[in-house]
Amino acid sequence: MVVSRALRATGCASCRLNLLRSFTAIAGLPPRTPYLNARISYLPSAPRVRFSSSTIDNGEQSPGTPNKTIEEEKLDEGVAEEMAGEDTEAAGRSSEVSAVPWYLEVNAPQPEPQPLSERQQIPELPDSPPPTLQPLLQQISVDLGLDSLTLLDLRKLDPPPALGANLIMVLGTARSEKHLHVSADRLCRWLRSTYKLRPDADGLLGRNELKLKLKRKSKRAKLLGKSTADNEDDGVRTGWVCVDVGVVDGAAGSMSSLAEPSGFVGFGRRTDGVRIVVQMMTEEKREEMDLERLWSGILKRGVPDAIKASDEATTSEPSNSVPEHTLTYGSMPRLGNGPSIVSHSRGFHTSARNLFVEAGAIKPAKEGPIPEFQATQINITEMPALNDIQEIVAKYVGAGQYEEATQYLLQQKNDTPELQNEAWRRLLLSQLRVYLENVPSDQALLDLGQSATDRDSTLLLKCFHQSLSLYPSKFEGDMQVWLYCYARKLGHTGYNFKGLMTLLEEIQMNGVEVSTKSYLQLLRSALQVQHVEGKYHGPPRHRVEGAMKILQAMYDRGHNILTEDVFVTLQEATAPMPGLESENPSIYTSSSDTFDLPSKKMSAIQRRIHVLMRSIDMPKFRAESRLRLLDLYSRQNNWKEFWDLWRLALRQGQPQTAILYAFMFNRVAETMHQKACINVLRTWFPDVQREVPAVPLEGEVARAIQACLLVADPFVERDSNNPKAKGEWISMWRTCTGSGN
């Protein structure tokens, strides 16, 4: 005990070794002692040295000790070299050794252990984070145990992704399939209870559903006599759950500085909320999908550094400065736009963009559809400053000087606020449309080029496609759809049905927003058939399938497809063109259904649409829509469906207007069917007098009823001049003429 304490009290390794040698020499122990390769741990104040029990001589040999062998000398040299290295490390601290006992020394502060490993680190928060984001990341990483969290800030992505604007995406890796579904289920429950949100988990298997499927899988494998670890897709291993947290409150004051300038033109709504989406995947699925690489590429393209730099430059430089990324065509002046507006909703972008893009730079995928011109044209007649500009541009376009028209608009843009914010593109595209609609069809076919993929074979096409922005707006997309459908309406062979469906696919893939009227134009262009060999029996099957794809695209984009406009468009598009003979020559006649008018059988597809239109609960049709359908049915001699539609308004409690009564009596009179005119007059003439609001028997209504009366009784006009003459038709005639009974 005394020796061991004396050894520990000696701070220097050399001193301890010399002390040990003195004891061994006095005791007369043999020098050949095995070297123990062991280390002894000491306090932090003392260096760690290797201790050996073999005797070492300092060069002074005692009289009683034998001479060292060669092996002992080599062993002593190795031990000396090892201790020399340790003594060098301890030399800096040897002077600090004090006489304080080891049990009174204070331990050096140890670094705090990290509770989370590297793969469990929580990512840094982005700028202006929503208050819910930090607790959500803490819940996902610590409580749920998801690893390798990645945060993607997609709030500045333009156009916004399909998941929604102001999007923040969180990606995490689950450790197993069961851990994936359990974590997603717990996250949804936590969001409901803590923040009263309604998260939507796509791909989640609930607790009971997962247990049931695993039980069935095990039972099926037991019956088949094989292992359950097969590679078949049994619906249990999804590998991916997408939890849409929903829209949460954004950071306070994050949108206060984004004030819209006067004259801003766009669509969509601005919102301060932030949408958060959590992508949970297994490790294999995450490596397979590689969403980080996908969204990083989209983010670089959607928010390029050049646009960010131009946004900062426009706030400090004059308005005529141009960012480096602006492309020019020919000798066009490079003009900048106004200050940039960072918006989280789709709209016309005010950041500096390409004034002109070469034809090869605009991909066909950027094409998209347009509404009717009257509904989308800029109302420039109310802007006195634009009247002269519009007239000059119209003259340039009419003379075929498209490049001069573009240069003139670019020169006037900075001096005319109404032409800024991409409004000059709308004006130029509108004038191109007016020109095409007013020139002869032969000239329009020449200006439309060779095919739908043609971008620069004619000056008009070159000007049209160069007037489109890099990210087409709703108006620009609608204009492209109108151009394609108008070319098909003129019979251009280069704009075929296959190209029309390709245009629809590009609209879907690129997320181009188009109006309902543009989708209706696509429907009409896809279903209408110009030439048919033999009898017409409806559109071909592949065209009907294309129309179904268009309707599905409308529904996916949030458009209502069960509307009167859609039904009227479908009925008009599936009707046979003038001169085409229908396949169904059979005639149907009934005094109650058709008022004895010979009614032809409607085609199968039109009949289905008509029955569906009557069956579903829809809002009341407008008078214009009913008039279009009545005109279509009467021209096709589908009188049974004609009177079905006429009575539909009565069943819905909708009054008939004077225009509808005049149209109905005129069409019946044009058939020159005496019996039908008699039945119609006896049935509907009293209703005209009882209509609320009242329909005056004058003007077009009176003349239409008189035309029917002349078919029912050719001598009614002559007999009505006789004051003594009486009769059913004479009374109606006198009522219409206002001469009394």
Image (cartoon, grey):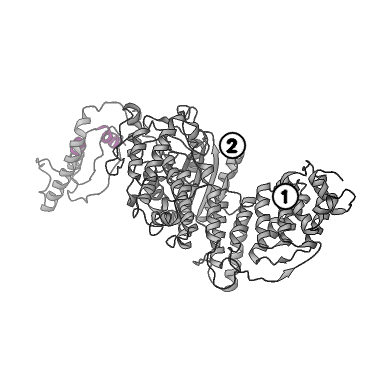
486 to 741, vertically: above or below: below
Mark 2 neighbour density, 10 Å: few (under 14) some (14–19) many (20 or more): few
Please say whether residue 108 is visible from this viewpoint: no
Which region is colored magenta?
1-18
The answer to which of marks 1 and 2 sits earlier in the sequence is: 2
* Residue type marked 1: Ala
The question of residue 439 being in magenta is answered with no
Secondary structure mostly seen in magenta is: helix
As helix, strand or loop, the secondary structure at mark 1 comes to helix
Residue 662 is labelled as: 1
Q: Which residue is drawn at 81% across and 53% down?
A: 718
Label 2 sits on residue: 195
The residue lying at 53 percent from left, 61 percent from top is: 546
Q: Can residue 325 be seen in this view?
A: yes
**Mark 1 neighbour class, 10 Å CA radius: few under 14, some 14 to 19, many 20 or more:** some
Q: Where is residue 12 in the image (x, y as percent from the top left)?
A: 21, 34
Question: Is 410 displayed left or right of 548 in the figure?
Answer: left
Where's residue 161, x and y in %? 47, 45
Q: Report the amino acid beneath label 2.
A: Tyr
